[in-house]
Image: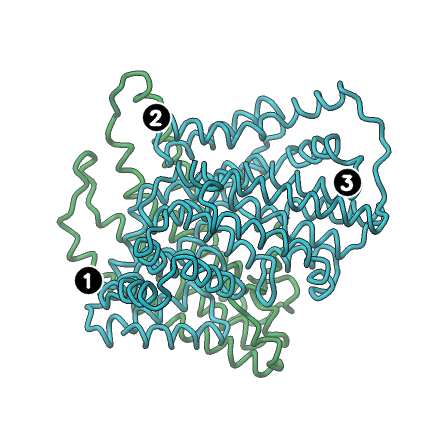
Chain colours: A green, B cyan
Amino acid sequence: MTTTHTSSGVPAPTGTLASVVKWVDKVVVIAGTAVAITALVIMFVSLMAEVIVRYFTNQGMGWPTEMPNILFPWLVMGGIVLAAQRGQHIAVTAIQARLGRMGNKVLLIGHQALIAATFFYLAWVGLDVLEITGTEVFPVTGITAKWAYLALIAGFVGLGITALTTLGHLLPASDPLAVRAHHIEEDV
Amino acid sequence: MTLTMLLVFGALLVLALPVGYALVISSGLAAVTVGGMPSVAAVVKIFQPTQSFPLLAIPFFMLSGSLMMGGTLGKRLIHFATMLVGRFHGGLGQVTVVGSTVFGGVSGSAVAEASALGSMLIPWQKREGYPGAFAAAATASSSVIAGLIPPSIPLILFAAVSNQSIASLFLAGVLPGLLLCAGFMLTCYFSGRLRGFKRLTDEVTLKGVLSATLSAAPALAMPAFIVILLRAGIATPTEVSVLAVFYGLLVSMLVYRDLTLRRLYDALLHTAVTTGVVMLVIAASNLVGYVLTVEAVPTAVADWTAETLKSPWMVILMLNFIMVTVGMFLDLPAAILLLGPTFVAIGNAIGLDLIQLGIMMAVNLSIGLFTPPVGTTLFIASAISREKVGAVVKELWPFYLVAITVLGLISFVPAFTIY
């Protein structure tokens, strides 16, 4: 099994388009990392505080239990986008061994087109979800559920953009399999 | 609707589209175009798992594992295992097995374990004259024990699918995990004895063993700490996972004194990415579950199975066969989430305890992690050892026999899982 990140093995494309693609990838990675890590740290601190307070007073504070409802979607969507940027989403890639470079290039371009179309469409549908859920409010914090659903839209847009930048890497690549190629043994 | 979903999913999988995307596209297409489900409802279905409090245990257990595994703990555990079993026949292989079992109580993930332990133990075994393929086989097979020792991520997923207690599943996984450990150790022992593998000759003293045990104690205590908190009802699984992170931070800062800001950042980032990988599959599987439930597929399959196969023994045999086969192709979380709803219905139909089914599922699908054509721990160990997958598979045969024997025991003798 191989999984698909921008690898140092790919010859760096040059030109304005390449610079834009690189810049966009950087923005997506920084945003995804900031969102996911912030969500994780806030959830940890608030849930830990809830456990400690409940242990000593036999009564919870309440608001920390709503934090996951708002922040878990942000951690999940940030993580999904980061995994896409690093090519870590798991795939069964047996067919790639049977295809030549051109075949793999066509296959991977097809993937990215499909992923971009799917997730931009889902983000657009998500706007309707935001409208419908606008009236839902978390009872203790009084925060609207829109903030949780917004994570979904942001994540879908992040995935769509990542698919487009992957296309930007794929088109000039001489070895398409090296684009966002994740080598699992390097995770050590 | 189900047929459309399965056909599209199968086609996209063969075309190497990542599993999570393939699930979103196939189930969404089937639900919206064939089933007439509004697109908005499909998006809400994808969103729902992110509101599950029990599933929040997954990132926190991953974070506690990353915090503890990223430091000097690995070396301490290997030293501990070497002190215990290094001097016996096949000792270095046995160190791998014992190390994996103890590490499993921290990491909860077979893949993380194969990477972390394999990178330390495979080169060491090769330097000591062990065949690279054997070293890889010992790592690939023993790392899957992590899927059974608490805090096991696959068992949390099964709990979510089957509405079973995470605490009961964690407790039920311990004995099968230890059985696999004992079986793999015996395999290494006999391989070492028959093939004359080098034994370590370093002098082992009681003081040395005690010192190594003390050094590894924080990791050894982790699974016990988790099970006790859960069984005593002191905290929910998610709260226990948060406490495990706190414990990991304390141990890294105060006991091992190896926590740096860089390592903390790496652990947080690794947790975020791995959560993304697992949760994409979980979120998409919620939509798949909707498609299957609307057409009552799990109930229909369960009724058909019970009527056709009659004997529960035959049904259990068939379940095992399907799970091992699916596990050869699909990754563990996806397989649990896809097969779970149908298998739970079948289990209920034949009176199979769902805790036992959960452990059967974890063992079956774990075997898939070290079998070709798609075996994650097999590929990792093979890559680290620089041995061909085929050569590693040849060395894996006795390990497969052990795993199948343990699978048989937990499938047909409930006492191994229900206590």
Q: Tell me the chain of label 3.
A: B
Q: CA distance from mark 3 to mark 2?
A: 44 Å
The picture places residue B152, in percent across and down from the top left corner, at: 48, 43
Q: Residue furthest left?
A: A135
Image quadrant in which you'd find residue B204: top right
Real-space Cα separation, disc 1 to disc 2, in angstroms: 37 Å
Between residues B162 and B409, which one lies in front from this camera angle? Answer: B409
Task: Report how far apart the C-alphas of labels 1 and 3 lie in the structure.
Answer: 62 Å
Q: Is residue B252 visible?
A: no
User: Residue A87: x, y in percent?
Assistant: 53, 61
| Amino acid on which disc 2 is placed | Val
Whole-percent x, y for residue B363 in the image: 51, 51
Q: Check disc 3 and report the residue beneath it.
A: B91
Q: Is residue B131 left or right of residue B106?
A: right
First-in-chain label (1 vs 2): 2
Out of B395 and B58, give the one closest to the viewer.
B395
User: Within 10 angstroms of label 2, few (less than 14), some, or many (20 or more) residues?
Assistant: many
Subunit that carries the residue with mark 1: A
Q: Residue at x 72, y 62 (%)?
A: B394
Whether A43 is drawn above or below A134: the answer is above
Q: Which label is found at residue A128?
A: 1
Q: Looking at the image, is mark 3 or mark 2 nearer the viewer?
A: 3
Do marks 3 and 2 both belong to one polypeptide chain?
Answer: no
**Dot 3: element:** helix
The answer to whether mark 1 and mark 3 are in CB contact below 8 A is no
Q: Assess disc 1: are there few (<14), some (14-19) or many (≥20) residues with their C-alpha within 10 Å of its C-alpha.
A: some
Residue type at numbered disc 3: Gly
Q: Quadrant of residue B283?
A: bottom left
Q: Which residue is mark 2?
A: A51
